Image: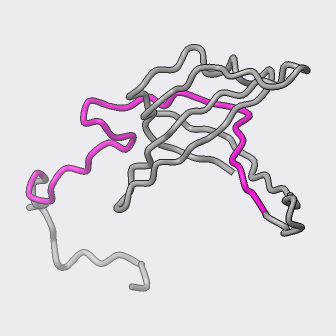
Amino acid sequence: MEVQGRIKMVGDTQTFGSNGFRKREVVVTTEEQYPQHIMVEFVQDKCDLLNSYKEGQQVKISINLRGREWVNPQGETKYFNSIQGWRIEALQADASGGNIPPVPPADAFEPAGDLNEEDHDDLPF
């Protein structure tokens, strides 16, 4: 799966526990009708993939959804989800800020003036 959008925040690498587990978070804002702020975590050696990225950059992040179960001290089972990134790519934006070139308005094209109604083509429609 992939998440695409503009980087809102790149966090610092955090280290946890005696075994040195590393985690780094990035927040990407999607560019759609209802933009979403998606937090993606990169773990262990993948933390370094974020070193060359900055806020405001357009990116595409390859992700895996992760889920885990936890039983609290009261015996209740809880479930947690996380979005884990494993690749990130910069997207090149054009001058208008989008990735798709704009379509010129219809009135920018000249109408065809050399049509001959007597010429018939063999198209069935």
Residue placed most toward the observer, 21 or 116: 21
Q: Is residue 103 left or right of residue 1?
A: left
Residue placed most toward the observer, 10 or 69: 69
- When asked about the image quadrant of residue 62, the answer is top right
Residue placed most toward the observer, 95 or 85: 85
Position of residue 106 measured from the top left corner of the image (x, y, whole percent): 15, 59
Residue placed most toward the observer, 58 or 40: 40
- The residue that appears at 56% across and 33% down in the rendered structure is 26
Q: Is residue 88 left or right of residue 105?
A: right
Residues in magenta, as a range = 79-108
- When asked about the image quadrant of residue 36, the answer is bottom left
When the figure is inspected, residue 26 is found, relative to residue 83, above or below; the finding is: above
Quick check: is 104 in the magenta stretch? yes
Count of numbered circles on the image: 0
Position of residue 18 measured from the top left corner of the image (x, y, whole percent): 89, 20
- The residue that appears at 15% across and 71% down in the rendered structure is 116
Quick check: is 30 in the magenta stretch? no
